[in-house]
Image (spheres, grey):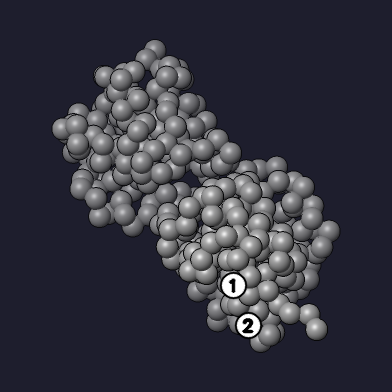
Amino acid sequence: MFLLATIKDVAALAGVSTATVSRLINQNGYVSKHSEERILQAMEQLNYEPLVLRKMTALNMPTIGLVLPDIANPFFSELARAIEDFAQPKGYAVFFCNSDHQDFKEKNYMEFLRKRNIDGIIYASSYLTQEELQKLRKEKIPFVLIDRAFGMEKSTVIRCNNFQGAQIAVQHLLESGCSKIAHVYGPWEAATAKERTDGYESVVRSYAWYTPSLMAPGFFQIEGGMSAVHTLLRRHPDIDGIFAGNDLMAIGVLKALHRMGVRIPDDIAICGFDGIKLTEIVEPELTTVTQPIYEMGMKAAQLLIQQIEVREAHLEVVELDVSLTVRDSTRRRSEQQ
């Protein structure tokens, strides 16, 4: 008789406790990167299927896999909520896969979902390759991509106009009186990061003060934004405006400048990108380019379920508009002008 692997089997093979395996599966506690790798390898080797997915299969419940790069980022939390809000009333369960921006982890999740006959996949991360897409198409697994670049042939993509959004942000900083604007950018493997950087450069390239050294990486993280500010101010102490490629980095910029005694926006104005709720909580409240996050999630779920139920891929690229939300991190400077 064939016996299903258990969480104890996974823990024993990986050389960790069952509690550590549980924390990784449920994403509710710290697991070291080394342990995480060993657990994922053990799960793959044992063909282990988490109990929650086994129950869904037993109940014959249609299931959507949602692959996210960082569930701790409020952007992806709100996106996930919208997808679940749309899918649940339709009778679909959503299985969350958090990759922590690790390509090997995303590949393991994709392999896991394909082998478990998932009904469809929403992919909101940056490491999906054309080879992985071909596997999904070959196995006739419906999928929708969120925030991916143009050029993903034969794919349904939900995205925002990142290039134009960055232009709007930089133009607003200029109109607010800034005379030298820096940019904190996200990881280059993310299409959104590159498009927002391209938008920034398209506006500032013609100014005499522009130089590539006005850009520094922030990796879409608060800590990255804090580190980038120190780098930028060492290079250019006369910076008076900063465009951060996402709101988490903008919050990191704000935090670092506050610790240095820099007045915002009087000394340096800040604009972020995404429109997450945290921008309303920090002080001063952050100006940001707002994406319709909830609408993106709802649309992605709607188009995926259409593919699943019709069993025919209706391929399209849906590009949603962004808008500028002006708050105190640029407003007082603007009003003084």
Q: Residue furthest right?
A: 138
Point out the frontmost of discs 2 and 1: 1
Task: Please state the horizontal and vertical placement of residue 268, each as a whole percent of the image.
Answer: 24, 30
Q: How many residues crowd around disc 1 within 10 Å: few (fewer than 14), some, or many (20 or more)?
A: some
Residue 255: quadrant of the picture: top left
Q: Residue furthest top?
A: 208
The structure residue drawn at horizontal position 46% and vertical position 19%, both measured from the top left corner, is 212
The structure residue drawn at horizontal position 57% and vertical position 48%, both measured from the top left corner, is 102
Regarding residue 144, the answer to whether it shows in the image is: no
Q: Which residue is mark 1?
A: 8
The structure residue drawn at horizontal position 68% and vertical position 74%, both measured from the top left corner, is 5
Residue 143: quadrant of the picture: bottom right
Instruction: Please tell me whether mark 1 sits on a helix, a strand or a loop.
Output: helix
Q: Which mark is residue 181?
A: none
Task: Please state the horizontal and vertical placement of residue 92, each as a whole percent of the image.
Answer: 61, 78
Q: How many residues crowd around disc 2 within 10 Å: few (fewer than 14), some, or many (20 or more)?
A: few
- In the rendered image, which quarter contains the N terminus? bottom right
Q: Which residue is mark 2?
A: 55
Relative vertical location of residue 103 with respect to residue 210 in this rendering, above or below: below
Disc 2 marks a residue whose amino acid type is Lys
Disc 1 marks a residue whose amino acid type is Lys
Task: Please state the horizontal and vertical placement of residue 336, each as a whole percent of the image.
Answer: 16, 33
Query: How far apart in space, not on screen, are marks 2 and 1 (Cα)?
Result: 18 Å
Task: Please state the horizontal and vertical placement of residue 35, each as a whole percent of the image.
Answer: 54, 55
Going by the image, does 214 lie left or right of 153? left
Q: Residue furthest bottom?
A: 59
